[in-house]
Image (cartoon, grey):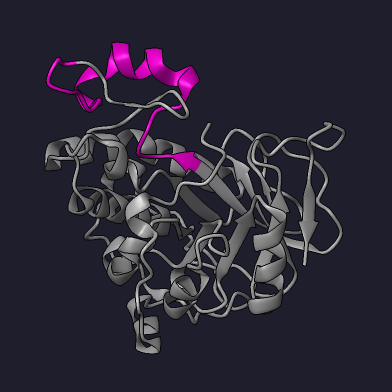
Amino acid sequence: MSLAARSTNTGRARWLLAASMMMLVGCAATDTSTNAPPAASPSASAATASDPSPSGSVRLPPTTGEFDCQLSGSYPLPAGVTVVSRDRADRPAKGAYSICYVNGFQTQPEQKRFWRDEHPGLLLRDADRQPVVDGDWDEWLLDTRTEANREAIAGLVGQWIEGCARSGFDALEIDNLDSYARSQGLLSRADNVAMMARFSAIAHAHGLASAQKNSTELLPRARELGTDFAIAEECNQYAECADYTAVYGDRVYVIEYRDRPFAAGCRDHPGLMIVRRDRQLTLPGDDDYVNRRC
């Protein structure tokens, strides 16, 4: 599972985004209390980027309370937490807006056999026909370069997204949107934008909001991504939080892994939910466990 910061090197340069970019996210102003998921939705494999996702069809996360990131395993919500991110294998949290984590652009280490044996053509391969690897996390990259591949990946990952909805999650968090930065130049931003648009359409079709995970360089393309809010790792560390808020307002949920950027974020962005976690997202009782909020 990918657990640490995913911002790319190319995203370190700050985008000078005007406040008018808020219009990029058509449903960012949807009131969380007035929009119920649709009563019925098409199957995951049928949803495509062309599917409509009217602003009233998903419930957006609240902007008050606290945020927690529990990707390595669920545990009781700390006091005050109203928004929580959990892995798709876990259950949503009762009493909180629950975001379902799915690794949509790379393979989980434990799923390599599944991809290698059943869907080898969907793995990105180098000139020697070997899978391209994210060495930090021992994950293979998925090949999003063609429409046929994106359709096939959407059919597989879409089943997991549909599972998130059946489990009762409120939103989707797709990780590794920035896999193009680790692709040896084989993938383009446009490839992954098109892939993310499919994921967002599937999420909306099943009543889930869709999050942009990291990748500040894609903020100007938020409308194409189809995303409704953002989850940003270390945006205070890299002075990127204002870039996210220029597009998503206060619906930016921040994870910091170091004390100084965490303190700076609490000071400079009092309207955001910011959590200080340990980089491995350990569980309570572990010696390395850190979990603090502003």
Task: Quarter of the image for the C terminus: give it.
Answer: bottom right
Q: In the figure, is residue 244 to the left or right of 33?
A: left
Is residue 183 or residue 60 the one in the foreground? 183
Q: Which x, y percent locates residue 194? A: 22, 53
Q: Which x, y percent locates residue 18? A: 36, 86
Q: Residue furthest bottom?
A: 20
Looking at the image, can residue 287 be seen?
Answer: yes
Residue at (23%, 27%) from the top-left corner?
122
- Displayed quadrant of residue 120: top left
Does 64 sit above or below residue 101?
below
- Does the magenta segment cover residue 12? no
Q: Which x, y percent locates residue 93? A: 72, 49
Does 55 sit above or below residue 146?
below
Q: In the figure, is residue 175 to the left or right of 23?
A: right
Q: Which residues are magenta?
A: 102-129
- Displayed quadrant of residue 53: bottom left
Does 137 sit above or below residue 272?
above
Is residue 160 or residue 194 the one in the foreground? 194
Looking at the image, can residue 226 be seen?
Answer: no
Is residue 195 or residue 280 the one in the foreground? 280
Q: Which x, y percent locates residue 227? A: 39, 64
Does 245 sit above or below residue 252?
below
- Does the magenta segment cover residue 120? yes
Residue at (35%, 67%) from the top-left corner?
219
Residue at (51%, 79%) from the top-left corner?
249
- Displayed quadrant of residue 290: top right
Residue at (38%, 69%) from the top-left corner?
14
